[in-house]
Image (spheres, helix red, strand yellow):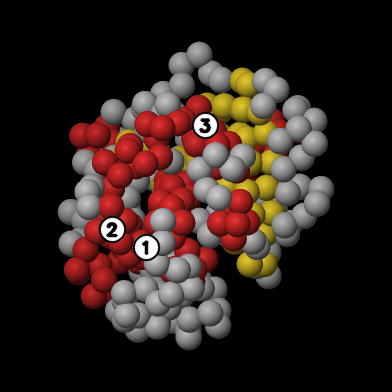
Amino acid sequence: MIYSVHSNTRSVYPEQDKVVPWWSFTKTAIATLILRLIEQGEFELDSQFDGQPYTYRQLLQHTSGVADYAMLHDYHKAVASGAEPWSRSEMLARIEVDKLLFPPGKGWRYSNVGYLLLKKEIERRYGGSFNGTLQKHLFLPLGIKNARTIETMHAFDQLNVSNNSYDPRWCYHGLIGGTTRDAVTFLHALMSGQILSKPLLEEMCTPYNLDFDVGDRPWQNPAIGLGLMLNNRKTLNTMGHTGQGPQSCFAAYYFDQEVPVTVAVFEQTHSQALVEKKAVELAKTFK
């Protein structure tokens, strides 16, 4: 297990903090870049996305109705077998991307494809690659030097994971790799108001409450923000994201407590609960 903890009072970082896959914590970076565009007046949060019936907010919040490839048995079978990733157009055809699961704003369904659409918008609006935009507008201003997009099997081979046969092209919205220290640096700066204006940060952290059983995970009042997973409870008020890929999980969370603290945890495991519980345990040591 690798972890980093950061607060304004003290920090704990591993001596050898290797680059690991952030998995769906990548969505928090995508959401931040989209909100930066909104702040610059490029479009409004509740404006329609590219002529579609759903809005930017609904894509960010997973309330757009856009389907997801994770729903497909054939997707999981192909990834497990080491098959060549489908082209983007083939994947979108397989999920029937224009056939919404529900009217926008009338339901909730986690959608990686929604974030693929947002990533494409980032590349179009910023006029460059996703990695180049991340470096210029997020990571380098924060002094983050290790985080980068992982786009090839060779690049994935270099990460600190036991399963090095994964092709990151299966992760259609993009995959960031970075150290746990990189993750806490980014998330702590974001939650401390160093990246977005206060009004947009409040929008990002506004909870859309989810009514389902999370099992043995520590979030008893789960909610979704804009690119964030939240636990909407005074005794455990958190903002961040958990991600899972083949044989590993990553969790990065900001704990809004008496001494605010940001924690990132990576482990070679199939249990998202394990990394989340470790994050909670570490945050408590800073109270």
Asked which quadrant contains residue 84, the reply is bottom left
Q: Which residue is mark 2?
A: 125
What x and y, as percent, mark residue 285? 75, 27
Near-viewer residue (177 or 273): 177
Local secondary structure at mark 2: helix
Which residue type does callout 2 highlight?
A: Arg
Tell me the number on the disc at residue 42. Answer: 1
Q: Which quadrant is home to the N terminus? A: top right
Look at 52% across and 48% down and name the residue there: 196
Q: Which quadrant is home to the C terminus? A: top right
Local secondary structure at mark 1: loop
Which residue type does callout 3 highlight?
A: Thr
Look at 23% across and 47% down and name the residue there: 129
Say whether residue 186 is left or right of residue 261. left
- Is disc 1 surrounded by few (<14), some (14 to 19) or many (20+) residues within 10 Å? few
In the rendered image, is residue 285 in sight?
yes
Near-viewer residue (6 or 99): 6
Which residue type does callout 1 highlight?
A: Glu
For marks 1 and 3, give the CA distance.
27 Å
Asked which quadrant contains residue 72, the reply is bottom left
Look at 35% across and 84% down and name the residue there: 99
Q: Can you say whether 81 is above or below 95 in the image?
A: above
- Cβ–Cβ under 8 Å for marks 2 and 1: yes
Sequence-wise, which precedes: disc 1 or disc 3? 1
Sequence-wise, which precedes: disc 2 or disc 3? 2
Tell me the number on the disc at residue 185. Answer: 3
- Is disc 2 surrounded by few (<14), some (14 to 19) or many (20+) residues within 10 Å? few
Look at 28% across and 58% down and name the residue there: 125
Local secondary structure at mark 3: helix
